[in-house]
Image (tube, rainbow, N blue to C red):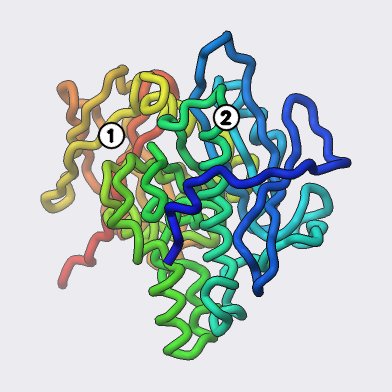
Amino acid sequence: MWDLESLSAPPQTHPADGFEEPGVRALFYEGLPFRGKPTRVFAWLGVPEVAGGERVPGMVLIHGGGGTAFADWVRLWNSRGYAAIAMDTCGCVSGGEPGARPRHGFGGPEGWGGWGQIDWPREDQWSYHAVADVALAHSLLGSLPEVDGERIGVTGISWGGYLTSLVAGIDSRFKLAVPVYGCGYYLDTCFAEPLANLTDEQRKRWMRWWDPSAYLCRARMPTLWVNGTNDFAYWLPATRQSCRAAGGPTTLSVRIRMPHGHEPGQNPEEIRVFADSILRDGLPLPRIISQGRGGNEVAVNYASSVDIVKAELTYTEDDGPWPERLWEAREAPLQRDGLVTATLPEGVTVYYINLFDERGLVVSTEHVEVEPAED
């Protein structure tokens, strides 16, 4: 669907006069045509100070619904020793308020989801353009002399997490992907409702063209999925299916009632450590090797380069809508190195295990839905 050869070439850039932020620069880069007319994409770009001849890794940053390109997000990654680029995927520039960002004269299609665009030509729809915007940002970042183009990852928040899941199966140049909240399998998210308002043909077309589930099998890079138990938009079954569908190694980090938003979505320390472990030879996150259950007894095998200091059985006894379930946690005994066991309380409907390492980082097993016992 996308011409990846042309998207791999660095796009032409243009000044973004009137936009200034400390330590980063604003620019426009050329996107794909929209309705036959040229487009430009607004972005913030930042590179940390480097010694002569040194090349740093990079991150492409994809904002969520109501968001835009965020300069502070770029600076956050610059402070970690990464070059970074954050682009607006909806034809807007920085400023304004969520849902009312100022558009510019060379913008492409508006986001999000493109439910009302599904009968437009495919090359004019938002998801098509947003994926291309991300790939072009990747190409631009990797072309900088201070950046190692072979060490670039991607992360996105909410709708940006959706796009991260999507582009991971399309742009194989990325060395890692971190979707936060967002994932594929939209029929198992809050977005099942707008999909239900489409005709059967439109819904099937959207799922075939734009749902990450159609592409994740091609995502060979390591992927970290970050979410909360009660996310209003992206529910745990969709996250689990996405994690299973990805074609490369996957890691889960699911915290109880993690807030949904740009600031909580950009700051989890697990994201930085995951990126460092792949792009800067840092110590990796703990790894779940296997999980199993016999009756009410649960066991998890893991491997870790740093000490695991605590494990928790995280569970709910509710079976209503996923965002409304009450989740609780109780300590799960650490047995010999690499083994955690736990006993399920009566009435548990869903559970998973969280491992906490000495750095305070969390890695999770898949959640398991418990069938009620027969009378």
Task: Identify residue for label 2.
Answer: 144
Asked if residue 88 lies left or right of residue 207, the reply is: right
Which residue type carries mark 2?
A: Leu
- Nearest to the observer: residue 273 or residue 229: 273
Quadrant of res 273: top left
Point out the tag, 1 or 2, that comes first from the N-terminus: 2
Residue 343, given in percent of the width and then of the height, sits at 22, 43
- Nearest to the observer: residue 146 or residue 192: 146
- Relative to 112, say whether 61 is above or below: above
Which residue type carries mark 1?
A: Ala
* Element class at badge 2: loop
Quadrant of res 76: top right
Residue 351 is at least partly visible in this image: no
Q: Which mark is residue 36?
A: none
- Relative to 372, say whether 42 is above or below: above
Looking at the image, how many numbered discs can be counted on the residues?
2
Asked if residue 96 lies left or right of residue 337, the reply is: right
Residue 4, given in percent of the width and then of the height, sits at 43, 54
Task: Identify residue for label 1.
Answer: 332
Quadrant of res 107: bottom right
* Element class at badge 1: loop
Q: Are marks 1 and 2 in contact (CB under 8 Å)?
A: no
Residue at 49%, 53% in the rendered image: 6
Residue at 52%, 42% in the rendered image: 139
- Relative to 118, say whether 314 is above or below: above
Disc 1 from disc 2: Cα separation: 48 Å
- Is the C terminus in the top left, top right, bottom left or bottom right quadrant? bottom left
